[in-house]
Amino acid sequence: MATFELYRRSTIGMCLTEALDEMVSNGTLSPELAIQVLVQFDKSMTEALESQVKSKVTIKGHLHTYRFCDNVWTFILQDALFKKEDSQETVGRVKIVACDSKLLLQ
């Protein structure tokens, strides 16, 4: 199974994709190498989250929509309340994408 493209829709992921597309268009980089860079990006993000994130957050809200496709859960919450040890934040609408991290490294 190919790695999931979870982090490519983040700001940094979209900027990386744009830069790689430009380099492929200019002939500076081969399409194969650009794909390898994106796959490595997914793996690096997964490893960083596993090793560096230590905080725990509680999320409560109204579950608007949920989906399970290709071993990936997608939840859309409305009026979500995020609670951390010393703070809390309410968000009007949030999309959460979750998968088994072991599947990312296959």
Image: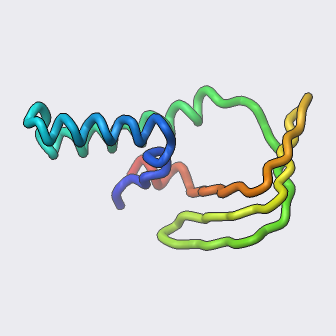
- Against 21, residue 5 (above or below) is below
Comparing 23 with 57, the one in front is 23
Q: Is residue 4 toward the left or the right of residue 82 in the image?
A: left
As displayed, is residue 41 above or below residue 80?
Answer: above
Horizontal and vertical percent position of residue 61: 85, 59
State the image quarter where residue 82 is shown.
top right
Q: Position of residue 16 (x, y in %)?
A: 35, 36
Q: Could you tell whether 82 is left or right of 86 in the image?
A: left
Q: Residue at x 39, y 36 (%)?
A: 15
Number of numbered labels in the structure image: 0
- Tell me: 105 left or right of 22: right
In the picture as drawn, the residue positioned furthest to the right comes out as 86
| Quadrant (top left, top right, bottom left, bottom right) of the N terminus | bottom left
Figure coloring: rainbow
Q: Which residue is more in the foreground, 91 or 36? A: 91
**Residue sitting at 84 percent across and 57 percent down?**
79
Which of the 4 image quarters holds residue 72?
A: bottom right
Q: In the drawing, does residue 35 fall left or right of residue 63?
A: left
Q: Nearer the viewer, residue 105 or 41?
A: 41
- View extreme (left): residue: 27
Position of residue 47 measured from the top left corner of the image (x, y, whole percent): 50, 34
Q: Residue 84 placed where, x, y %?
A: 85, 36
Q: Is residue 14 above or below residue 55?
A: below
- Front residue of 45/92: it is 92
Residue sitting at 61 percent across and 64 percent down? 74
